Image (cartoon, grey):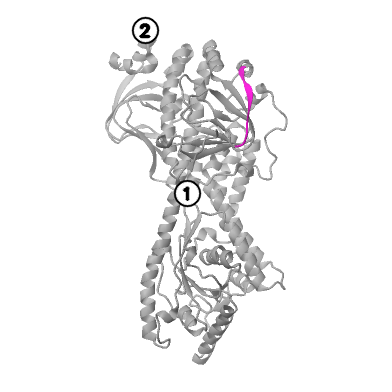
Amino acid sequence: MPPFDIFKALSFLDEPDQDILDELANACKKISFNKGEEITTQFASSTHFYLLLDGEVSFSIQLEHEAAQFEVGYTTGPLTPLGWSGFRSPYRYATTDTASTDCEVLQWSHEFLRNMFTKHPDLGSTFLEFVLEHAVKLLSKVRTELSTYHIADWDSDQLLENIEDRQSTNSPSLTDLLRKSPFFEVFSDKYLKELAKIGKRKKFTAGEVIMEQGEAAIGYDILVSGKVSLNFTPKEDIGKKLALMRTLTHEGYTISWAGCLKDKSNVSTAIALQDSVVFHFPKKKLLSLIVQYSDFKLALHYRLLWLIGNQLRSARSRLISQKFEKEILAIRNLIEQNSTQLDASSKLHKVPYLLNNILTLEDAFLCLRTLIKNGNTLERGLANVCLGVLGNVNQENKFYKGLVNVYESVVKSPSDEPSSAIRKKCAICFQEAFEHSDFVIGGWENLPDQAGHIFIYNHLLNHPYNTLPNNFQLTLDSHFVSSMILQKKYGDPGIRVVRVSRNVEYGHQNYYDRLGHINVHTPESVRIKESEAEKKNRKQQFYDEAQAYIQRGINIMISPEGTSRITTQSPGALKPGAFKLALEISPEPFIVPISVANFDKRLSHNVLSAYIHKPMRMSDFIKDKDNRKELSTFLINLEAQYKDYVKQAIDLADDYKIKISQPAVFKKKI
């Protein structure tokens, strides 16, 4: 038994019954852990509960097939509860808690504490409320870190796409609504009817604040109909900025819970995104009901711990997906934590496998949307959490579907449709696809007012993730320039200089043949046997064709490297073709350099960027177009300058990523 004075520091033991205090003390052990020792192990049966007396403890999660532990928090606070997930089903530790320094803890068995709480409900309620306070602090820490990331949020109107909305068109009775509520469904009808007596319906118009973080809680609220956003603000930004945590659209879901406790402030800000109806349980009447029924009070505190535990689990899953870019593994972990409670036949088990391949992503989302509508309480809750974690993956999936649409819109165009019309249609489809990505463009002021110029860009590799089912890769950087810059500025995407396809590249050939671009042979094309005269004639044909387009006021896009690289190795050596072309054309066109970055990476967690640089005329640098040495010196200098151009594009993307990661400015409705 630890020294008696330790118990004086426990706020929930104010003026306790001496017999209860003795029983708690006799069942308690004071234990030391050396630095590096595990106090709890993730997924192990939660046999013991701990209170930290001294030292630092880190919380980590192990993901399937990953050797490393992912740290999701730490604590140095004295009397921090550890292993409290044992108070809720499935009674297993949610994290591995490791002594970061030498530590001392108090230890009780969970079985003993649960029995004590059943015998002494008031003790149980105050004990659990103490644990709850610390759980909320942990949740706040995770949300504070999470708020620094840009998280693509689901449009909840699309969550049930092609599925009948779960919200009833009829106005449910409060008792029926409570029976459907994931939070209240475990309570007996006796208490649901008591709650129904004190509840009242409240209406909020779109944009109206339902509750504000930091203000005194005035009750418990659940959604009846409409759409409500739950938002979090880091402590230093209270009243200024909001980070979206979740959007609620399902009846019976909890909006605010802090009114169940005395002197508790709201832990989030809720805003009606549509006209919404809420059932509100006033704090005064709710606390009166709690005082009247001590067993209800204990059950309520167990349930609140269940709710905060779920929110913490969800926040940690989202943190792993953002901080470590491990969305699918985070979902595997989430499902594994609940595997003992899920039916063996639950469709949730197949979701991680469907997420592993871009071709089955849509099946994974359909499965989750279906479970939100038809699943049991656990499945609905987990499906909602999964969708929250998968916000960026959903965005990426929409982009991929956009690429498929681009390809099919081109290759399935009518045979008599002009290539100029197909190019514009292609650009518009790409604009729609890129709307599902984060991108930024700088240097618009450097574009010439009129079209009819040569645009050069550093060419980047495609990420394999965006490969179409026929193994064809649509080059993202070139299509971005043509659709998001040229089409938007000049109303035409221009003409690209593209390599001739190899014989086996059917997708490449079918696509580019319909677009009518200028074809050139590169080392990546099929080899051709030709004499020097034939080679010279082929180059002249290229110059003549390109010049004709420019003189008609159509822009030409060329990648002077002739091959593609990753962003950090771009650009490569520049070939002279584009620059010789400019010297051959009269009147001389501008060469407009554009630097691009990050098109070689997966879209999730990245920002695509393009920077338009000041145009130049070759005659300002080359006095004798036939002087090879003069042209070679120019290319070497431009390659060095282009490295700085690419750095500008990288910096532009990094700055924009920081900008979109900031919580939105919050203006309270008066």
Instruction: Read off the residue under disc 1.
Output: 660
Assign a secondary structure to mark 2.
Answer: helix
Quadrant in the picture for the N terminus: top left
According to the picture, the residue beneath numbered tag 2 turns out to be 18
Above or below, 145 against 87 in this view is below
Q: Residue at x 57, y 26 (%)?
A: 221
Q: Nearer the viewer, residue 632 or 573?
A: 632
| Residue 347, position as x, y percentages in the image | 61, 41
For label 1, count other residues whose C-alpha is less than 10 Å away and answer few (under 14), some (14-19) or many (20+). Answer: some
Say whether residue 332 is visible.
yes
Q: Is 103 left or right of 450, judged from the image as shown? A: left
The stretch in magenta equals 198-206
Image height of 30 relative to 622, above or below: above
Q: Position of residue 437 (x, y in %)?
A: 53, 54
Q: Nearer the viewer, residue 314 or 584?
A: 584
Give the mark nearer the N terminus: 2 vs 1. Answer: 2
Q: Residue at x 66, y 36 (%)?
A: 374
